[in-house]
Image: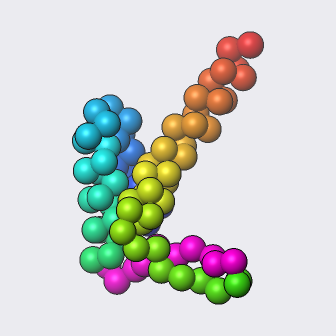
Amino acid sequence: FREEALKLRPWYESSSKEEKYRISDLLVESVKSEGHRFLEKGSDGNWYEVIGNGARKKASQALRERMKKKSLSSSITSR
């Protein structure tokens, strides 16, 4: 999942909001086609599959993660 997100990240970074939505959907479909699932820990301590828009939100977060770290380190270095 993370490797696929890394491959899509450059495209994601240079895309419009609508394109980013489609790219995150593409990542979700890629993960699911390989037989994997998006999971979330419930308040009872058990793991549950994330369905619907929740999976796309998790995919979008994975596509953004390195962008935040990169911009943070850039601002620290420029000081």
- Write the residue at 44% across / 56% down: 57
Q: Is-magenta flag for residue 36?
A: yes
Where does the image place residue 19, in percent across and percent down from the top left? Answer: 25, 41
Q: Is-magenta flag for residue 50?
A: no
Quadrant holding the N terminus: bottom left
> Is 55 left or right of 27, judged from the image as shown?
right
> Is 41 left or right of 20, judged from the image as shown?
right
Residue extending furthest top?
79
Where does the image place residue 50, in percent across and percent down from the top left? Answer: 46, 74
The number of callouts visible is 0
Q: Is residue 16 above or below residue 30?
A: above
Residue 70 in which image quadrant: top right
Residue 32 visible in this rendered orientation of the protein: yes
- Write the residue at 42% across / 78% down: 37
Residue 3 visible in this rendered orientation of the protein: no
**The magenta segment:** 34-43
Foreground pick, 45 / 13: 45
Where does the image place residue 15, in percent across and percent down from the top left? Answer: 29, 34
Q: Is residue 45 above or below residue 38?
A: below
Where does the image place residue 26, in percent across and percent down from the top left? Answer: 27, 59
Q: Is residue 76 above or below residue 55?
A: above
Q: Main secondary structure of the magenta part?
A: loop
Foreground pick, 43 / 28: 43
> Is 42 left or right of 6, judged from the image as shown?
right
- Write the residue at 49% across / 54% down: 62
